[in-house]
Image (cartoon, rainbow, N blue to C red):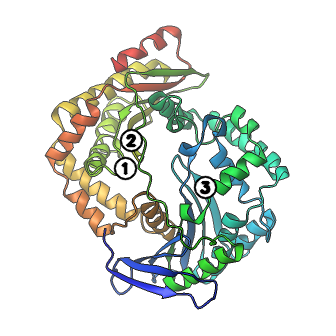
Amino acid sequence: MTSRSTTTTARTSSEARAVARTQTLIKGTNGIGTVRKTTLPGGLRIVTETLPSVRSATFGIWAHVGSRDETPSLNGATHYLEHLLFKGTQRRSALDISSALDAVGGEMNAFTAKEYTCYYARVLDTDLPLAIDVVCDMLTGSLILEEDVNVERGAILEEIAMTEDDPGDCVHDLFAHTMFGDNPLGRPVLGTVDTVNALTADRIRRFYKKHYDPTHLVVAAAGNIDHNKVVRQVRAAFEKSGALKNHDAAPIAPRDGRRTLRTSGRVELIGRKTEQAHVVLGMPGLARTDDRRWALGVLNTALGGGMSSRLFQEVREKRGLAYSVYSYTSGFADCGLFGVYAGCRPSQVHDVLKICRDELDHVAQHGLSDDEISRAIGQLQGSTVLGLEDTGALMNRIGKSELCWGEQMSVDDMLARIASVTADDVRSVARDVLGQRPSLSVIGPLKDKQASRLHEAVA
């Protein structure tokens, strides 16, 4: 999306050898919803969205690194590093970091995904300078001491154990492995017990220096804020740490993908003594940049996105075979996933899988009815708007958009794209995605005879 206006601001400091470039990406109404972007000398990007009607602000820093960037021996390093950046800097101890935000009633957290990492804080608008200083200090001045690495190792191993104890969560990691195999996208974000135990402070420091350069970062802020003030405060924080040394550096481009290999017709089963069997039936989806993603979103909503969806009605409402059943999509730079999840009694697994497969096959061949499409469009539009009702969601949207797409789309434009989806669009994407041979992942206490029949679901 092209910017609407461009200005440049020069530093008066003798340290400045270049100018910052500021763009208005989305022009709001009376300043509400205006999205602006400034690129500092050194390649650091700062995007903001103003919402003067609230008394809060959310500040975040997005790093262009995720578990996809790890070698097999580094699996889990991105998430490990996320933990370590909270452990202390040259200016603050771990207690100083947490108490600074607690003292003003703020919230601070982080998350690691397969293609990015985000650190953020939500505070009262008057406390935004504090949040900026603390989060920027964490990102640029982390010590990564060996003793902290050793202590945090135990916490991460407990997190892995906690995930393993939740088969409804763990089955999605298994499905990624089923689809991608021993590939960075197929490995767990948390890493494994073996890889986490093998990571050293030196290896994590090298990983940090490589991936947390300003050119790999996007700063995002949303709420009752002033763009120029945020830029000045962020610039001061980064210059204080010496992070903006190379004024000629340019931001890296959005990830373009590497043609990840995908498989079909695979079945993976983990036998576990659980009360339910947890299954994911799915196939390759679409990359996040694919223009058909809007039609796929409508298709996904109609198939398994709510209580009126086909899968919910057929599996739960009419037959009572599962309490939780839904479909979902995941889009990456060069590929994606479409999956159907259900949790059911082990004795009902084959019935549930047959119903899900029959529905997928039917929609692949015949598409959806006009009523289903209309209802899904309305549901998707409503959930899109309602999901952006707080400053944290707004920060996530503009930060991820800059990092992953390199552009911003207004809410009105998104709603228009959803509304423009036609029955032919849905029919085409259903044929392309759902018409593929699926793969299957299962965690549960299935007996040998039951397990041997699982291949019927992907035949």
Considering only vertical position in the picture, is 130 above or below 369?
A: below
Query: Which residue does the numbered mark 2 point to in the structure image?
Result: 336
- Tell me, yes or no, whether the two marked residues, 2 and 1, touch with CB atoms within 8 Å: yes
Of residue 35 and residue 423, the one placed in the foreground of this image is 35
Going by the numbered disc 3, the residue's amino acid type is: His
Going by the numbered disc 2, the residue's amino acid type is: Gly
**Which residue is at 35% across, 26% downward?**
438
Residue 288 disc label: 1
* Disc 3: CA contacts within 10 A as few (<14), some (14-19) or many (>=20): some
Question: In the image, is 401 to the left or to the right of 424?
Answer: right
The image position of residue 406, as x and y in percent, is 40, 63
* Residue 94, image quadrant: bottom right
**Which residue is at 42% across, 62% downward?**
401
Considering only vertical position in the picture, is 8 above or below 244?
A: below
- Tell me, yes or no, whether the two marked residues, 3 and 2, touch with CB atoms within 8 Å: no
Q: What element does badge 3 sit on?
A: helix
Quadrant that contains the N terminus: bottom left
The image position of residue 61, as x and y in percent, is 57, 65
Q: Earlier in the sequence, mark 3 or mark 2?
A: 3
Residue 211 disc label: 3
| Cα separation between marks 3 and 2 | 24 Å
The image position of residue 376, as x and y in percent, is 26, 50
